[in-house]
């Protein structure tokens, strides 16, 4: 199918065309940039929500519950569910749909599972592009669900308007990680499986850690007042607490909108996307030239013998004819 | 770099025995494929919808209930309606040889009985994928 035919099918809202568009973008097939460019003017309408957290925290179940509630309110929902690729085999077992059965047959819901395919964190490099495609298709809400393993929380926060971090009473260790700086990425904390022992304790721990962070800001009042992430309790399997999460997401969106942070956040996202594209292009331009790789291989003896340094070799590579040029001081 | 083959592994119908489906899902993953596993008690409509949304190359059904003569044709038909005749529909379970042959005449791929090595299944899918007309994604 040509790109033009695909785009026509896409605009006719054929689910198969939506699915194929995401595949082309995910696989970086020829023409993927033209497709993203053609869809770009139609993006920017969806509210994008990130759902992240450790494995088994109930992210998919929570995502399904939020989706059901939004559907009941008349909103359509596109979901990108990201699971890890095995670094050994390149394969992946994508099981998030199992928990989303309740919304699987709803015409107003589209679920797409993506594997990380070597992306460093828990987020597929293509997830942000897939979110753009879903946004352009016209979904009112786009959820990116991803396993949180450190860096990926930052990625998902950057790709969304509101980022929800899901923890469970057993996530005590995760709080330590939060203290190490990941706390900032979450706009909302959800302690799921809150019917289990320890839920109150972990909520208090999170709230305490948040207050430590918020204290200096409170001492010097600023406008707009900073957003204080709420810490909510849910039991996603039964639906307990879902209404609170929806309310908090709406409150966060209203906060973003009223303070101008939404526009700011989205502009930052666009900037990051361009930087990302430039990074990728430079990388491709550098290494698609087989001579660069060959030349580098020829430097390994000198490097191993400590006759030169990795920095000198890198600068020489960049300064090669056809290289990217040396940064002028 | 070649993209991974995407396979939907589904367990339609009312029987609750999903060990076979899980073993197959894990074997295909270990063979470098991206496997979307949807769990038990899937209706043909759920399977076809998931196959379209996930843009898979292959749908594998595990059927132990005896309903294969109904379920395979129904999924094939729903994929046709969705414009996805190109998807390989394969699977396995307790299926008599004569039924396997009858289903294959209606556009279902090879079916695998009990005791099949997962290696045979992996080989079958890989060979099918390699021979198939190149797709634009």
Image (spheres, rainbow, N blue to C red):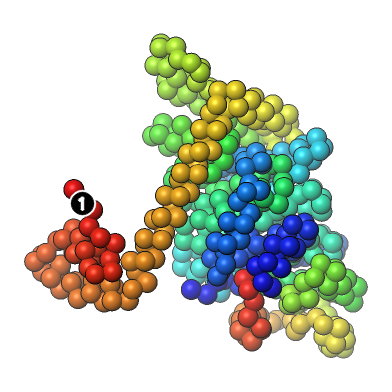
Regarding residue A298, the answer to whether it shows in the image is yes
Quadrant location of residue A304? bottom left
A11 vs A230: above or below? below
In which chain is the residue bearing label 1? A
Point out residue A185 in the picture as x, y percentages from the top left corner. 48, 35
Q: Is residue A321 left or right of residue B129?
A: left
Q: Position of residue A222 (x, y in %)?
A: 45, 15
- Give the answer, above or below, for where A79 lies relative to B80: above
Residue A194 lies in quadrant:
top right
Q: Is residue A205 left or right of residue A114?
A: left
Residue at horizontal 53%, vertical 65%?
Answer: A28
User: How busy is the neighbourhood of tag 1: few (under 14 within 10 Å), some, or many (20 plus)?
Assistant: few
Give the number of callouts: 1
Quadrant in which the N terminus of chain A appears = bottom right
Nearer to the camera, B1 or A60 = B1
Residue B43 vs residue A104, the one in the foreground: A104
Secondary structure at numbered mark 1: loop
**Quick one: B51 or A13, which is closer to the camera?**
A13
Can you tell which quarter of the image residue B130 is in?
bottom right
Q: Residue A124's x, y, as percent? A: 53, 55
> Going by the picture, which residue comes out furthest to the left?
A307
Please name the residue that numbered disc 1 is placed on: A328
Q: Is residue A100 visible?
A: no
Q: Position of residue A20 (x, y in %)?
A: 67, 65
Residue at 58% across / 27% down in the picture? A256
Instruction: Please tell me which residue is depicted at 45% across the width and 19% down the height of the picture.
Output: A214
Q: B23 left or right of A118?
A: right
């Amino acid at each position: 199918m040509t790109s033009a035919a695909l785009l026509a099918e896409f605009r006719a809202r054929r689910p198969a065309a939506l699915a194929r568009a995401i595949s082309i973008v995910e696989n970086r097939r020829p023409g993927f940039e033209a497709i993203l460019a053609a869809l770009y003017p139609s993006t920017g309408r969806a509210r994008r929500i990130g759902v992240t957290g450790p494995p088994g925290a109930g992210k998919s179940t929570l995502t399904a519950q939020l989706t059901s509630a939004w559907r009941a309110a008349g909103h359509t929902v596109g979901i990108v569910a990201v699971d890890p690729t095995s670094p050994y085999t390149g394969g992946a077992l994508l099981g998030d749909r199992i928990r989303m059965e309740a919304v699987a047959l709803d015409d107003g819901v589209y679920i797409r599972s993506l594997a990380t395919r070597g992306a460093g964190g828990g987020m597929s490099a293509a997830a942000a592009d897939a979110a753009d495609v879903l946004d352009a298709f016209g979904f009112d809400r786009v959820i990116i669900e991803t396993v949180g393993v450190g860096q990926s929380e930052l990625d998902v926060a950057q790709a969304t308007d509101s980022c929800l971090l899901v923890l469970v009473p057993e996530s005590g260790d995760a709080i330590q990680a939060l203290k190490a700086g990941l706390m900032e990425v979450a706009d909302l904390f959800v302690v799921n499986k809150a019917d289990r022992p320890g839920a109150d304790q972990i909520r208090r721990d999170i709230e305490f850690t948040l207050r430590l962070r918020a204290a200096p800001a409170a001492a010097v009042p600023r406008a707009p007042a900073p957003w204080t992430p709420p810490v909510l309790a849910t039991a996603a399997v039964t639906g307990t607490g879902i209404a609170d999460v929806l309310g908090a997401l709406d409150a966060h969106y209203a906060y973003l909108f009223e303070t101008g942070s939404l526009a700011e956040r989205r502009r930052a996202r666009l900037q990051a996307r361009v930087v990302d594209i430039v990074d990728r292009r430079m990388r491709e331009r550098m290494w698609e030239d087989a001579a660069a790789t060959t030349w580098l291989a020829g430097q390994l003896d000198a490097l191993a013998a400590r006759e030169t340094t990795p920095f000198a070799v890198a600068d020489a590579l960049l300064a090669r004819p056809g290289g990217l040029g040396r940064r002028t001081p | 770099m070649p993209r991974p083959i995407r396979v939907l592994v589904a367990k339609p119908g009312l029987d609750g025995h999903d060990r076979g489906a899980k073993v197959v899902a894990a074997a295909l993953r270990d063979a470098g494929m991206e496997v979307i596993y949807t769990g038990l008690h899937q209706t043909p409509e759920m399977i076809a919808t998931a196959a379209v949304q996930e843009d898979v190359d292959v749908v594998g059904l595990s059927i132990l209930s005896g309903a294969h003569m109904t379920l395979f044709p129904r999924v094939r038909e729903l994929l046709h309606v969705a414009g996805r005749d190109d998807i390989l529909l394969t699977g396995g379970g307790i299926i008599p040889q004569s039924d396997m042959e009858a289903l294959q005449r209606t556009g279902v791929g090879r079916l695998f009985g009990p005791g099949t090595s997962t290696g045979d299944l992996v080989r079958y899918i890989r060979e099918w994928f390699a021979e198939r007309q190149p797709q634009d994604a």
